[in-house]
Amino acid sequence: MVRVFDVGRICVKTRGREAGKMCVVVDIIDDDFLLITGPRQLTGVKRRKVNVKHVEPTQYKINISKGASDEDVIKAIEEAKLTDTVKQGVKPNLYLIPTVH
C-alpha cells in the first residue's frame, strides 16, 4: 500500500490517546516513520516520531520548511486559515473498535 506524505501535510492521528486529533508532518524520517507536531498548544499533539500506519493524510497542506518550529507551523496554519479545522479534529469511528462478547 502506497501512502503519500509530504512536509506540511495535515494528518489525523488514528491510534493512541491522540486519536482523532490533527497534526502536521514536519519531517519524513524514512518509509515507515514521520516527525509530526500538533503543535501541542493548538491541538494537544506533541512533537514526536510516529509510524505512518498511525496517521491518515487529509486534503489540507500548509507551506512550511522541513523541520519547521512549532511557531512556524502555527503561523502557516493561521495564514492558510485552517486554525479552526485543525483545532476541531475529527471524531474517531467507534464502529471500528472490536467489542468483546
Image: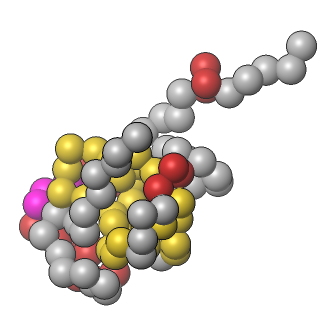
- In reply to whether residue 5 is colored magenta, the answer given is no
Placement of the N terminus among the 4 image quadrants: top left
Please name whichever residue, 62 or 80, is drawn nearer the observer in this view of the structure.
62
| 20 lies above or below 32 | above
> On the rendered image, what quadrant is the C terminus found in?
top right
Residue 82 located within the stretch drawn in magenta: yes
> Which residue reaches farthest top?
101
Q: Is residue 66 above or below residue 15?
A: below
Q: Residue at x 28, y 51 (%)?
A: 4
Residue displayed at 25% across by 63% down: 6
Q: Quadrant of residue 29?
A: bottom left
As displayed, is residue 92 above or below residue 26? Answer: above
| Image quadrant assignment for residue 73 | bottom left
What is the magenta range? Answer: 80-84
Is any atom of residue 42 visible in this view?
no
**Secondary structure mainly formed by the magenta segment:** loop
- 36 relative position to 94: left or right: left
User: Residue 7 location in percent, x, y?
Assistant: 25, 69
* Whether residue 95 is visible: yes
- Seen at 53% across and 51% down, the residue is 54
Image label count: 0
Coordinates of residue 61 in the picture (x, y in percent): 18, 57
- Residue at image x 61%, y 24%? 96
Foreground pick, 5 / 97: 5
